[in-house]
Amino acid sequence: MRLVSTLATGNTALGFSAGVGLSTGDNNIDIGHNVSGGAGESNTIRIGNSDITDTFISGISGTTVASGAAVLVDSNGHLGTLTSSKRFKEEIRPMNKTSEAIFSLEPVTFRYKKEIDPAGTSQFGLVAEEVDQVNPDLVVRDKEGKPYSVRYEAVNAMLLNEFLKEHRRNEEQEATIAHLQKQVEALTAGLRKVSAQLGVNKPAPQVAENDH
């Protein structure tokens, strides 16, 4: 650990040239060879440089967290969570027909290449390049801008929208059927009354003279 700059306060750096770029930023933790943020960066933790390709952290697997938000990572290694509060959103409007894009998606089964998963675990999902052709907004891209993964949380939201649309259609159809059924019952009851009245008013059959 060493003091990064006399103009910056509360910074911790561990590693050769760690935090060397910090000159005015405060409350940072930089760990690793030549790991550093911008000159005025503050309240940030940076661990490892671009040469690091794998991360192992103990104490996570097997530990249950009953509530919380899933952690995501972007192509720069920035960790964070998705927020759903209205406080953080703008241009909010109904999804409407936008969700119909999911009908063009092609779910697949697959296995990752051996160098990624030697066990060859069976997987289920979508192919990012194919999703990109349907709706580019459903794709996560790497540093080069190439399709890397799929925003499955967005796909789930689209599925929910289509489910609710179908549910509303079913409710409308059920209401229409119930209304028609009442009309049929009313018509049936009316016909029965008319039939009953015709039966009462029907003249008695005349008896022929030869019958005496």
Image (cartoon, grey):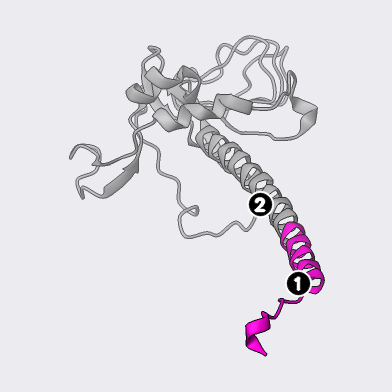
Type of amino acid under label 1: Gly
Position in image of residue 14 (x %, y %): 52, 29
Q: Helix, strand, or loop for circle 2?
A: helix
Q: Quadrant of residue 53?
A: top left
Position in image of residue 162 (x %, y %): 56, 38
Position in image of residue 165 (x %, y %): 62, 39
User: Is residue 189 rendered magenta in the image?
Assistant: yes
Q: Earlier in the sequence, mark 1 or mark 2?
A: 2
Dot 1 and dot 2 residues touching (CB under 8 Å)? no
Position in image of residue 199 (x %, y %): 75, 72
Mark 1 vs mark 2, foreground winner is 1
Q: Is residue 20 visible?
A: yes
Magenta highlight range: 186-212
Q: Quadrant of residue 178?
A: bottom right
Q: Residues within 10 Å of mark 2 (few under 14, many from 20)?
A: few
* Residue that label 1 marks: 199
Choose between 17 and 112: the one closer to the eye: 112
Q: Is residue 199 left or right of residue 70?
A: right
Alpha carbon of mark 1 to alpha carbon of mark 2: how far? 33 Å
Residue 128 drawn above or below residue 120: above
Q: For the point 63% across and 27% down, which residue is it?
A: 96
Type of amino acid under label 2: Ile
Q: For the point 71% across and 76% down, which residue is it?
A: 205
Residue 6 drawn above or below residue 201: above
Residue 119 drawn above or below residue 96: below
Residue 185 drawn above or below residue 204: above
Q: Helix, strand, or loop for circle 1?
A: helix
Q: Main secondary structure of the magenta part?
A: helix
Choose between 174 and 46: the one closer to the eye: 174
* Residue that label 2 marks: 177
